[in-house]
Amino acid sequence: MIVRSLFSLLVFTALAAALSACSQSTEQGNVGVDKAQSKSEPAHQEGGADHADEGESEQRVVMDDAALAAAGIELQTLVPSQLSEELRAPGEVVDNAYGTSLITPRVESLVIRRHARIGDEVQAGAQLVTLSSVEVANAQADLRIAEEEWRRVSALGREAVSGRRIKEAKVALDRARATARAYGLSGSADGRSNGEFTLDAPHAGRLTEDDFVVGQRIEPGKTLFRLVDESTVWVDAKLPSESASHVKAGTPAVIISGGRRIAGTVMRNAHRTSEATRNATVRVEVPNPDDRLHSGDYVDVYFETTSSANVASQTATRLAVPTSALVQIDGETVVFRRDAKDNALLPVPVRTGEVIGDHTVIKEGLNAGDVVVVAGVFTVKSQMLKAQLGEGHGH
């Protein structure tokens, strides 16, 4: 019995020793895996840095000057400037009434032929339309007779013709000429009495209305053509009456049309407020040499006000960009800046200040001398997003 108990004790001790060795081996193996994993983590972090570089490159938009021009993208070098407080108002382009003429007959007529069409740009004296009228035929005949009679009595002289007869011939000639001019004729007989006469352009301009057909009978005063000198147009801007009182005649104004700034001058301030809208109309005269503005176009108008509260802003020199240059990306306000090294366009987060007119003050993010995108911003943004989608990684 004692021998059997000793044998059992030895076997139990050997088994316990074996189990203890296995446990230590397992613990040492787990430590080795952790170490291996900890060694592999820096490699993964390095890979993350590579992805950051790739993400930065995906935000770069590279376009040469030709591509920028084709896409309508405009660049501007930032310089500090004086910004004045401005009033913004919606405006509508209207014809310059001082340069507008309605081409109408002064007598009942029939349209014989046209010499111009709507949209034509004509010079002063250009033939527009030929008409025919019975009354004009009578006026042409009377003028021709009166001129011949005047020439006859003038040639005979006072020795052969009484002074009363000469005076009557002169009065008859003056009356015939006045009637001819009233009908739109030249006041001088041209040898014709067929009733045909031509309406000419009184000044240079563009034909913006054309409301007749050949063969149509026209009543006196009916508009056949509307002739407009578009070298100068008017813009009627709508402002609240209290704001319109700060805009004075003769002060400068800026018209924004299609992203382009056009300088104008206030012609007159409003003297009447609309009962329905409580708005007043301020009229601005705008030069239009390149025919960009047309009647009926809607534009934005900016006025410099005369209130004393704006003196400080008028004298302050600030760095600002057109408000249209700002865009939102990932919740941040950014401006696309051109890299001086490779001319790539990069989104630069900025901190903005107050909005003055159509410009926004930049407090942080940009410096004087930076070249930024001021037009076509959303085109650049879409190009950047396309690059990110096309080069993105699938993990």
Image: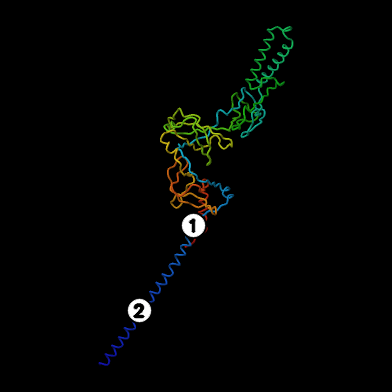
Q: Is residue 359 left or right of residue 176?
A: left
Cα–Cα gap, marks 2 and 1: 49 Å
Q: Say which element carries label 1.
A: helix
Please name the amino acid that badge 1 sits on: Glu
User: How was this image coloured?
Assistant: rainbow
Q: Which residue is mark 1?
A: 56
Q: Quarter of the image holding residue 41?
A: bottom left
Local packing at callout 1 (Cα closer than 10 Å; few below 14, some 14-19, many 20+) is: few
Please tell me whether residue 230 is drawn above or below residue 106 in the rendered image.
below
Q: Which residue is mark 2?
A: 24
Q: Say which element carries label 2.
A: helix
x then y, percent, for residue 261: 52, 39
Please tell me whether residue 268 is drawn above or below residue 356 in the rendered image.
above
Local packing at callout 2 (Cα closer than 10 Å; few below 14, some 14-19, many 20+) is: few
x then y, percent, for residue 4: 27, 91
x then y, percent, for residue 198: 66, 26
x then y, percent, for residue 368: 49, 47
Q: Is residue 139 left or right of residue 355?
A: right
Please name the amino acid that badge 2 sits on: Gln
Q: Nearest the camera: 237 or 173?
A: 237
Please tell me whether residue 264 is drawn above or below residue 337 in the rendered image.
above
